[in-house]
């Protein structure tokens, strides 16, 4: 490798590729706004008229989950801490299984638009309001960071215009969300997954060619200690070990997959419950593919820069920028490919932001507008949903501007997710799994869980854990053609832990900080969930929770699990009786069957008129 050769820069073709990606996304929005009679009702707009099939929904779930934080963050994570990150493959499997078998059956049979409707059905209005407000705050914060972080990283390496990119992505997103509703969100996500895989693939293929084969990359990684899969240290303070990733990761991601509105909204929009479950399991394959791609990219990064780390040599100012740096380094002879990678990072952003905007609109309409203004017609609700999309799109761009003032708060973003998601997951688990939980217990549990996870989370921000807890692997710079001395890497690998702008410096380390605040960030969510569950059960029992009479529909029952096997029994049945599509409900709950029947009737009418 010749280190003296300069980096490439962005050329016209790169901008063309990037603009094409934005234009196609916008075009999909326009298409769904006018085809099929547009968005007649708020249900069409927010839930795609409950008519989606498994594959597009699966790809859409994958896309919105994989933001640019994944595209830029995971490879540099693997580069710095090793491939133990790939243990998340097991975590993803557990998360999908839990979501599909515990949360999905209950939400699907109740036919709800907003997951927080469930909280009112099961507990009361107050609990629902708490859940809704938490979700809205969390999502706007997170979305702002998701828009801003990749724009910054790409801007500093490629000179891609920062605010141009932020505003362009925000506007395009808002545009197709507002026009096309959930259908547009799902189909643009399908397109964007394609772009993400293409971007990753171009980097991996070119890296393999330059480094001389996959075996070279794996050998380099092995010699550099990057293939550290087997770390079975049970210590909860280590940042990533087998156990923190399996246990903590499962809780953290279940709070996003199982109960987060932007995910649930999509699998509830499937035609049947079987399609909804299939969409989750197919999406697992997508998650695995993207995880494999990003881990490979991280190993390729290490193989390329093992003797000259650009971050220590001050060529890039943050680990997030390593990936764009690699792209400009190896793809500079192919005009248009760096643009494809930027498009790849941004389609990650677009898909996450669009699903957030759609979910925020859904929650606002269902939880804040409908209960208070009963008299609104479906048409005006549809208009209000569209107005909400515009409003939240603008808010998210605003949050991106705020994020730019906050400094490197990327890990803070993910910690916010854990801190808020954990207690919410506990709240839903209480409702679905614990028959005797009541609303007093639920509120008390939520507050307790929230206090604990905020305490740990904010403590960890103020007093970041020591390097021996996070175990960064060594990065070398002896191969650089520069005046840096070899010993330099020791001092600079500690930089990333000062992620927080308001950190307390030079404070004496107390046992509290070294143990309680040093808990792996993956356990924030676990703590929140368990505290919420435990307190909720205790207080429900002491306030007469066993005396309440509950509708069984709000709980997870034995039938919900056994009905998985109906698919095998019913096949022959359905073939012989084509005239009875009612069988498809897979449940003998009359309320649910009527909902299904009505919606098929309506969509039949709609389709009949537009054919």
Image: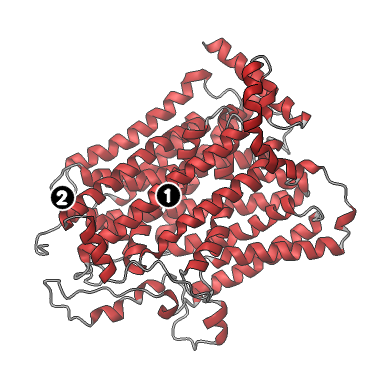
Q: Residues within 10 Å of mark 2 (few under 14, many from 20)?
A: some
Q: Residue furthest bottom?
A: 508
Residue 91 vs residue 545, the one in the foreground: 91
Asked whether 411 or 271 is in front, the reply is: 271
Name the residue located 50 percent from the left edge and 72 percent from the top edge.
Answer: 461
- The image position of residue 251, as x and y in percent, is 58, 59
Does residue 258 appear to the left or right of 187 in the view shown?
Answer: right
Q: Check disc 2 and report its element: helix, strand or loop.
A: loop
Whether 48 is drawn above or below 500: the answer is: above
526 with respect to 82 (left or right): right
Q: Say which quarter of the image contains residue 447.
A: bottom right
The type of colouring in the image is secondary structure
Disc 1 and disc 2: Cα gap in Å?
29 Å
In this figure, which residue is indicated by the disc labeled 2? 332
Q: Nearer the viewer, residue 111 or 346?
A: 111
Image position of 503 (left or right of 163): right
Give the residue displayed 39% in from the left and 75% down from the top. Answer: 471
Residue 119 in view of the camera: yes
Which residue is at 57% across, 49% downward?
97
């Amino acid at each position: 490798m010749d280190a003296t050769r300069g980096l490439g820069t962005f050329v016209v073709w790169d901008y063309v590729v990037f603009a094409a990606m934005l234009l196609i996304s916008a075009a999909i929005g326009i298409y769904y706004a006018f085809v099929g009679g547009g968005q007649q009702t708020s249900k069409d707009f927010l839930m795609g008229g409950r008519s989606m099939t498994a594959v597009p929904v699966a790809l859409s779930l994958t896309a919105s989950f994989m933001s640019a934080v994944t595209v830029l963050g995971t490879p540099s994570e693997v580069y710095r801490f090793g491939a133990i990150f790939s243990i998340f493959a097991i975590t993803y499997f557990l998360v999908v299984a839990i979501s599909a078998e515990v949360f999905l059956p209950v939400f699907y049979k109740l036919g709800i638009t907003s997951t927080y409707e469930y909280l009112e059905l099961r507990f009361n209005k107050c609990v629902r309001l708490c859940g809704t407000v938490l979700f809205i705050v969390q999502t706007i914060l997170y979305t702002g960071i998701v828009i801003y972080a990749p724009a910054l990283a790409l801007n500093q390496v490629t000179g891609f215009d920062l605010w141009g990119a932020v505003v362009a992505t925000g506007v395009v997103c808002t545009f197709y969300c507002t026009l096309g509703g959930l259908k547009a969100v799902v189909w643009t996500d399908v397109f964007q997954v394609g772009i993400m895989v293409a971007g990753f693939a171009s980097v991996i293929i070119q890296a393999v060619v330059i480094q001389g084969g996959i075996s070279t990359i794996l050998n380099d990684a092995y010699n550099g200690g990057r293939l550290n899969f087997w770390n079975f240290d049970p210590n909860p303070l280590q940042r990533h070990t087998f156990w923190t990733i399996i246990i903590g990761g499962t809780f953290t991601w279940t709070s996003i997959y199982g109960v987060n509105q932007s995910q649930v909204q999509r699998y509830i929009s499937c035609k049947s419950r079987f399609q909804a479950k299939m969409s989750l399991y197919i999406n697992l394959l997508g998650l695995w593919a993207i995880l494999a791609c990003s881990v490979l990219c991280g190993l390729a990064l290490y193989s390329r820069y093992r003797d000259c780390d650009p971050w220590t040599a001050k060529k890039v100012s943050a680990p997030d920028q390593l990936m764009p740096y690699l792209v400009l380094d190896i793809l500079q002879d192919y005009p248009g490919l760096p643009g494809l990678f930027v498009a790849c990072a941004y389609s990650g952003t677009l898909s996450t932001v669009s699903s957030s905007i759609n979910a925020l609109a859904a929650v606002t309409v269902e939880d804040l507008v409908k209960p208070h203004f009963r008299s609104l017609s479906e048409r005006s609700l549809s208009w209000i949903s569209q107005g909400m999309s515009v409003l939240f799109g603008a808010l998210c761009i605003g949050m991106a501007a705020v994020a730019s003032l906050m400094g490197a708060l990327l890990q803070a973003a993910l910690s916010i997710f854990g801190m808020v998601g954990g207690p919410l997951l506990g709240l839903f688990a209480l409702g679905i799994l614990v028959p005797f939980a009541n609303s007093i217990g639920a509120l008390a549990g939520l507050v307790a869980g929230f206090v604990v996870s905020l305490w740990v989370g904010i403590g960890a921000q103020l007093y970041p854990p020591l390097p021996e807890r996070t175990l960064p692997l060594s990065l070398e710079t002896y191969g650089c053609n520069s005046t840096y001395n070899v010993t330099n890497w020791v001092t600079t690998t500690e930089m990333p832990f000062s992620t927080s702008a308001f950190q307390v410096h030079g404070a004496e380390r107390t046992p509290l900080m070294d143990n309680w605040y040093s808990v792996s960030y993956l356990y924030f969510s676990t703590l929140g969930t368990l505290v919420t569950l435990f307190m909720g059960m205790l207080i429900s029992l002491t306030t007469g929770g066993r005396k309440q009479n509950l509708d069984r529909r709000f709980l997870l029952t034995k039938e919900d699990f056994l009905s998985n096997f109906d698919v095998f029994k019913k096949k022959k049945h359905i073939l012989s009786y084509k005239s009875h599509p009612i069988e498809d409900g897979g449940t003998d709950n009359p309320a649910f069957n009527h909902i299904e029947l009505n919606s098929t009737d309506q969509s039949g009418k709609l389709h009949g008129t537009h054919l």
